[in-house]
Amino acid sequence: MTRRSALARVVVLPLAAALPAALAGCSKTLRCEDTSGLSPDDARLRTEIAAYVDQSQDPAKHCKDCVQFNPGGKDACGSCKVVKGPINPNGSCKLFVKKT
């Protein structure tokens, strides 16, 4: 191994290791699925009863258009008055009520 190839490995390997984390930060899709701080009852309400999904399949029913939604700011998760945990503005659930 030459000094040049050893130096190249010292420079390239850390950059290659950091690449996946850097690309994850560039993702255009907002993820609001961390429910680790919820009680089991709140998690059950979110997934089973309200059937919250992070990306709505119905273009007419997005959380950002619901009366229960509290925005979290630009490119941030919001919250809901009924469903606990982080809420994606483009998500939806069975408890959707359109703003008037």
Image (spheres, rainbow, N blue to C red):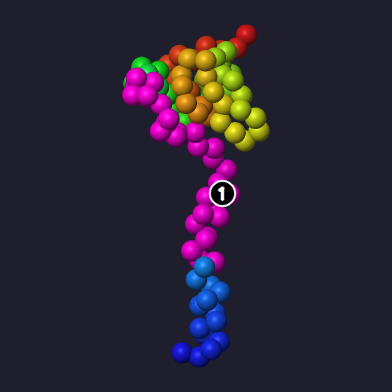
Q: Residue 57, can we see it?
A: no
The residue nearer to you, when weighing 12 against 57, is: 12
Residue 40 in the image: x percent, y percent?
A: 33, 24
- Asked where in the image residue 76 lies, by quadrant, the reply is top right
Mark 1: few/some/many CA within 10 Å (<14, 14-19, 20+): few
Q: Residue furthest top?
A: 100
- Is 52 on the left or on the right of 77, as rendered? left
Q: Residue furthest bottom?
A: 2
- Is 54 on the left or on the right of 77, as rendered? left
Residue 36 in the image: x percent, y percent?
A: 40, 33
Q: Is residue 14 magenta?
A: no
Identity of the residue drawn at 52% across and 15% down: 81
The residue nearer to you, when weighing 30 against 5, is: 5
Identity of the residue drawn at 57% across and 26% down: 78
Residue 100 in the image: x percent, y percent?
A: 62, 8
| In the depicted structure, whether residue 57 falls above or below residue 50 | below
Q: Is residue 16 magenta?
A: yes
Q: Which stretch appears magenta?
A: 15-44
Q: Amino acid at mark 1?
A: Gly
Residue indicated by mark 1: 25
- Asked where in the image residue 66 lies, by quadrant, the reply is top right
| In the depicted structure, whether residue 29 falls above or below residue 85 | below
Identity of the residue drawn at 53% across and 89% down: 3
Q: Residue 26, can we see it?
A: yes
Identity of the residue drawn at 52% across and 60% down: 19
**Label 1 SS:** helix
